Amino acid sequence: MMIRRQSFDVGLLLTVLFLSCISAGCSSQGDKLVEVAPAYQPSPTSPQVKMPDIVPAKPSEVQDAVRRVFKDAAVIDTTIKPNFLTGDFNGDSSQDLAVILKPVPAKLAEMNEQYPAWLLRDPSSVTSQMRASLNVEERDTLLAIIHGYGENDWRDSQATQTYLLKNAVGSNLFVRTSKEFQSANTGRRLPRPQGDLIQENLRGTDGYLYYASATYSWYDPRTFKPKADVGMMHRGR
């Protein structure tokens, strides 16, 4: 009996030691798992905003826009190149179309109707009396600026707000941003255009067409005199 009891005690002791070893091993593994550093995760970054691409104008689209506003009373002047430009000329974040036109002689009465679908302006005319006397003449070369509307800008079927400019078509027409305009005229007192400008040589002078105070005006760097009640750009100070 004594021998059996001793054998039993020895076996029980071995079993306890075995289980203790297993428990200690599991505990050790568990500690190691807890101490493992988490995988590196980069800090989230702000998503980049992709600006919409400006699709180049097609001649057929320009023709459609002219017909939408002027019907068949004016046509694109194909003798001048380029005869259309695009840009945000009135500063409303929508693309506009500037296109050179000539009136159709047989439709001159429609171009001079009392309530046309456009605003006839001469950028050099500064008084309302001078504007009231304006008329479209058969030999005029005109610059129509069709303002963009909705998601399709100047291509939109509802884009009809148009300025028709007399005595505003010269040569070497380019679109310039307001920033480019300021940089090119450092040191001068400048108007404050609301959007892009059209640079050109008009009657022998290099200047700019720009939109401000609800109309289009001509900037001649040699003769420009700022109005006291209009905010001006001060450069070079």
Image (spheres, grey):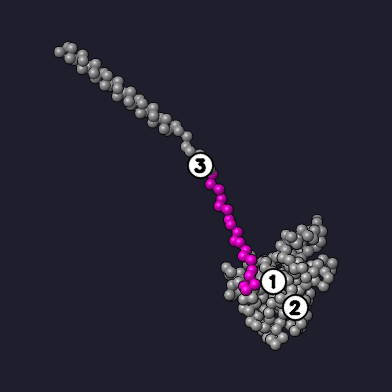
Q: Quadrant of the C terminus?
A: bottom right
Residue 204, x across and y down, in percent: 83, 70
Which residue is drawn at the image coordinates 69% and 77% (left, top)?
76
Q: Crowding at label 1, few (<14), some or many (≥20) Cα neighbours within 10 Å?
A: many
Q: Earlier in the sequence, mark 3 or mark 1?
A: 3
Name the residue type under label 3: Gln
User: How many other residues sit within 10 Å of disc 2, few (<14), some (14-19) or many (≥20)?
Assistant: many
Q: Residue at x 74, y 73 (%)?
A: 80
Give coordinates of residue 142: x percent, y percent: 73, 77
At label 3, counting other C-alpha atoms closer than 10 Å, the crowd grade (few under 14, some 14-19, many 20 or more) is few
Give the alpha-carbon distance from disc 3 to disc 1, as whole Å: 52 Å
Name the residue tied to disc 3.
Answer: 41
Residue pictured at 82% horizontal, 59% vertical: 187
* Closest to the observer, 108 or 220: 108
Task: Report the side of 215 relative to 52 (left or right).
Answer: right
- The residue carrying mark 1 is 84
**Magenta span includes 172:** no
Among all residues in the image, which is located at the extreme left?
1
Q: Which residue is mark 2?
A: 141
Residue 40, above or below 11: below
Q: Is residue 10 above or below residue 195?
A: above
Specify which label sits upstream in the sequence, 3 or 2. 3
Q: For numbered disc 2, what is the local secondary structure?
A: loop
* Residue 86 image offset from top left, x and y in percent: 67, 68
Give the residue drawn at x 73%, y 71%.
Answer: 81
